[in-house]
Image (cartoon, rainbow, N blue to C red):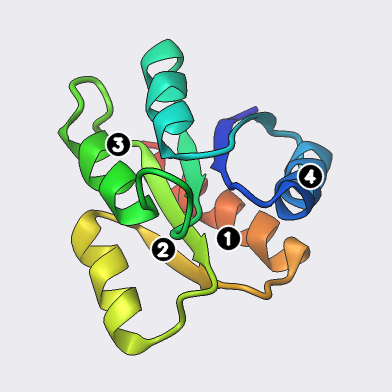
Amino acid sequence: MSNVLIVEDDLDIRDLTVFRLEQAGHDVRTAGDGMEALAALEEQRPDIVILDWMMPGLSGPEVCRRLRAMPGMEGVVVLMLTSKAQEADVEEGFRAGADDYMVKPFSPRELAVRVGALLARARP
């Protein structure tokens, strides 16, 4: 079982994502904004973070950059899940340190498959 942190300010999307990933056997925690995400990261190291872009306070890319600079967070996988679909947005997400990028609206089934694939590649 993998530890997943979902950072999403939209409650409906957060609940849907939690449901699907718990069905896939993951232990899921949530944060509603970037500051909550940083606090959750300090509390427990996740295996993967599913990160929205547009949130109150800190943006997803800023959270990703800060996560990448945190000691002990090496190897944490980051999947950006966002409605920002322009090529420049995708480039910025990857420059911030994302390992994968999905655009909303999204398939919860595809999300679960991607999470599994990312985690499988990240494990030695």
Place of residue 51 in the rendered image (x, y in percent of width and height, measured from the top left): 48, 50
First in sequence: mark 3 vs mark 1: 3
Q: Earlier in the sequence, mark 3 or mark 2?
A: 3
Q: Is residue 48 above or below residue 39?
A: below
Query: Relative to the observer, which residue lies in front, 104 or 22?
Result: 104
State the residue position of label 1. Answer: 114
Query: Is residue 56 found left or right of 96 in the rendered image?
Result: right
Earlier residue among tags 4 and 3 = 4
* Amino acid at the residue labelled 4: Asp
Distance between mark 4 and mark 3 Cα atoms: 26 Å
Q: Please tell me which residue is depicted at 50% across the width and 39% down the height of the picture.
A: 33
Q: Amino acid at mark 3?
A: Gly
Q: Report the residue marked by disc 2.
A: 100
Q: How many marks?
A: 4
- The C terminus lies in quadrant: top left
For the N terminus, give its image quadrant: top right
The single residue placed furthest to the front in the displayed view is: 56
Q: Nearer the viewer, residue 5 or 3?
A: 5
Label 3 element class = loop
Work out whether mark 4 precedes mark 1 in sequence or the reverse, and give the earlier one: 4
Which marked residue is nearer to the observer: mark 4 or mark 3? 4
Residue at x 30%, y 36% (from the top left corner): 75
How far apart marks 2 and 4 lie (CA) works out to 21 Å
Q: In the rendered view, does 6 fall on the left or right side of 121?
A: right
Which residue is label 4 attached to? Answer: 15
